[in-house]
Amino acid sequence: MRASDQPTILRRFFSAIAGRPLIVLLCGLAAIVFFGIQAADLEKDPRAEAFHPENHPAVIDRERLIETFGLKDPIIVAIYSEKPGGVFTQETLALVHDLSQRLAEVPGIDPERITSLATEKSISGDTYGLRVETFLPAPPQTPAAVMAVRDAVQATPSMLGRLVSEDHRVTLVVGELLMGADAEAAYWNVLALVENTETAGGETLHVAGPGAMLGYLGIYMDRDARTLAPFAALLVLFSLFLAHRSAIGVIVPTLVIAGSVAVTLGTMALMGANFYVITNALPVILIGIAVDDALHIFGEYRRRVGLGSEADTKDRVVQTMLAMCRPVTVTTLTTAAGCLALGFSSSIPPMREFGLYAALGIGVAWLVSLTAVPAVMALWFGRLAPSTSSQPVRRRSAAVAEAATTGLKQLVFRRGRSVVVVSAVWLLVGLVAATSLQVDEANIDNFQEDEPIVVADALINGHGIGSNYLDIMIEGSGEDALLRPEVLQYVDALQRYAESLPLVLQSVSYLDSLGQIDKALAEPGDEPNLVLGSEDRAAQYMLLYSMSGDPADLRTLVNNSYERANLRLYLGSGWFSKERALIATLEDYLAENPAPDEVLVTLSGIAVVHVSWVGMLFEGHLGSILASLVVVWLIATISFRSPLRGSLVMVPVIFAVLTVYAAMALAGVNLGVGTSMTAAIAIGLSIDFGVHLLHRIDERCRVHQPVLQTAVGEAIQDSGRAIFFGFLTGFLGFGVLVMSEVPGVVRFGSLVALSLAASFLASLVLLPSLILTIKSLGVRLLSTTHAGHSSAPSTQRQAGNEICSSVKTSAS
Amino acid sequence: MLFRQNLRVLALALPCLAVLTAEHMGVARADALPEGRSVAENVNARDDGQYVSRQLVMQLIDSGGSTRERTTRSFRTYDGEDKKIAIYFEQPRNVRDTAFLTFDYAEAGEQDDQWLYLPALRKVRRISGSDRGDYFMGTDFTYDDMKLDGKIAIGDYAFQSVGRDTADGIPCLLLEATPQTDSVAQELGYSRTVSCIDEEIWIARRTEYWDTQGNRLKTLHVRDIAQVSGIWTPQLLVMENHKTGHKTVFRISDVVYKDEMDRDVFSQAAIRRGL
């Protein structure tokens, strides 16, 4: 069949491209250069807050909390001492004093907001009167001075579990980032400070805290950006070379990759989007996905060269594009649909942007594949004679491919039923495994287990000092509302209850300051906590406390007018499941113990935001998958004009998704932020192989009128190679993500790669086995093929139908 | 040819340059800045009365706009070189009659004495002296700022006049003060201050502070300066903390200067008794 036999718009379109390839290529290159230049403006955003859905009540509450109390991200230096006496030795306390001073000198750290034994003050009462003194005003010179520090800390309950561990093994020096400071640079500076600090022996220093995590994640992102994309590109290009053994076979897909990545990143920059931890993986993923269309187009062109049916190069290019336009468009639509479903269903900005921009990248790859690819082929093959230098290699390659497809066909033809039965069992296993998946996520899980920041976090929490926070905001009405006795008593009871909960290691509120003074001023025989019964006493104590510290000391706990206070709980874990359980318990308590009149109590802070957005993520997970499945099925159904065939190509998809869930359950991988994206992306990608195969079966059946088994065999033979290399490039592209520094990205990459492997196998083995094994399916498939395919000439459709009837007979 | 042209240009330019340089130097001579230390001494020499009584309203405004107001009656007197300050709280109601007494000894190394009367306890309690760089009663003024009351600790700083500017439209001299040593800087919490000094009355109308790491820390605006009993008296002090967004406003009124105090307000018994 010649191109001129199809006077369609598409034919004219592809003819125009093949006729003016240079113009098309120059336009394409100009677009790549333009968007590539824009991409340089992209900025990374490693903040945990970047994942918070805008306008969510928990986010708004937290912003109000931060604004009211001036909370900042701390960088924590933990000093661990194995010595007898723990941190209460002359050397270790001298180290605390020294580090406190030097941390204040670190650029990016607020020198006025260092919290340690060297800056915090104890309030005590004795015969002198009221003493307000720094715990560690200078390095202690005698054992007695050391004991004095230890006793002062022991006498101040709010210090234990907050700055010093109960077992005295760990103490913290905490620095806060200056507003707008570069967290990554500050983290490096603190690391350098710690590395350059000499200890007397027996002490180890560790850096942790939200500020440190922020800095560390930024470093991870930079390393990922530097290594992943180039490595993915190299791997994919190598596999392309393996596939085609020619320069053109590499140049064509490279052009698609360049176009897809440059336009996507350039558009992101133009739209003011940032690079998040997740979108950092986008270029790598596009590299893996983008080449698929070009591979199939190029494969089809080569097949046509082998057939020698077209008159000249331009004609062959046009015919190739006409043949591949539909499957390439369908697979683009289905893959993009998976990403769009993720983008539109997610309320998490980085995931939404990931989905939307991945869909854009896939769309651009499609556009480049349908324009620049035929232009390059027309230009290249129109001017150069086919190379003969690699003919022996190609022959070997062809022999290997022949052997592989023969083996595959035999498996399908002879063991088809067994394949179907085994697959059905596996699907059941996957379904059961999916129900046992654990849902959990933690910020610290973004780091590798042996990273110093993880070790530091475990050390701090392991010694009973919480490095995660939950804030309880208490709001009264009118000046001094929180000094009313009933409010003081309510907050006291709430704080005591919170401290009794297992995850809560320590708490701090304005009542601690009042309690310290109450204790220091108490006379023998006084009842404890007299302050809780008198507003005047409370107000005068607050005035007294303000004499001993700077405004910012109390600023993080209570506002100027004593209308708003923050009860901060220090938690031993930042895992979603534990935080959610704690929040539920606290909510129950608040429901059973309503606050006094005109007092509002709100659970807030990073823990509540974390539980809110991760909860939303998981709640929307099933919906996102169902949306992806439905959209992809609809596209496949419309494309094949048959709900049955639309459903057939979904089989490898469901196989892949359930395989992923089974693997997660078996490997003990939680359904977290990164892994929750896997299914939607896998759905969009996994359908491609089935679409290409079914399209080929359809075409074989329609054009050459073979019996069904022959059609299936030829389809495997024709498209198996392109499907394999499509799978290989995708697999390598996503597989490269296992090199990421971010464990969540590693899990995401490896699970999507696994889903590609599962759907590849399911598409080439299970799908044809299913078609051949279940007779009724096979028959209906073919009958719908002919009824629904309008592009085939009617005479051929009729002929095809007859062959299908014979298949039905032979099959029965 | 070209060389000659260049020579001609040079011959014309050199005399012009010489004239301009001479003029510039002449301007510089006429506008010579006074020596920094002498400026500081002039500020300290300003008369601020042997004894002063005044109403002081403290407004503490946090970054969210929340405001706490305290009304006090404060007294200050000199006892030789030593300074005594008493602050009696009048508002809000729940701290009324609370009183604070401090003796600031001039002798180096001698710890200040501080007492506090809390009516809720009906007791005067001695409290340990605060560090100079500690903030005073939750305000953005440090204890040192309060004790100096507009004066300058000459021994702590090296001074340099760095230029001229205006503060609230009034011309003033820019005096830069740098702590003599790192330990003084740590003690005070400042690495540098630049004051805009009104040379007519020797009062700093504006002072900028930088923290020990060189970050811009706070700005003090001194306004509503009026003569009371012949003594120039600031009646509005606004201290803005740029790092925290916190702001403190001191409104001073009902100022009375005397050579001798008419009754004893600087004793433990007085702060217990109240005004």
Image (cartoon, coloured by chain):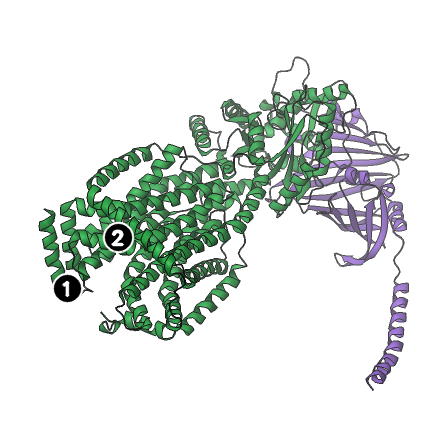
Chain colours: A green, B purple
Looking at the rendered image, the quarter that the N terminus of chain A falls into is: bottom left
Q: Kindly identify the residue that appears in the image at 75 percent across and 33 percent down.
A: B87
User: Looking at the picture, how far across and down is residue A49, in whole percent?
Assistant: 51, 44
Q: Residue at 64% across / 15% down in the picture?
A: A526
Circle 1 crowding by C-alpha within 10 Å: few under 14, some 14–19, many from 20 = some
Q: Which residue is mark 1?
A: A796
- A168 vs A302, nearest the viewer: A302
Q: Residue furthest top?
A: A525
Given residues A89 and A113, the one toward you in this image is A89
- Which chain is mark 2 on? A
The reply to whether discs 1 and 2 touch (Cβ–Cβ < 8 Å) is no
Looking at the rendered structure, the kind of residue marked 1 is: Gln
- Tell me, yes or no, if residue A508 can be seen here: no
Q: Which residue is mark 2?
A: A716
Q: Chain of mark 1?
A: A
Residue B189 lies, in percent from the top left, at 75, 40
Q: Is residue A416 left or right of residue A336?
A: left
Left/right placement of residue A331 relative to residue B6 reads left
Residue A772 makes an appearance in the image: yes
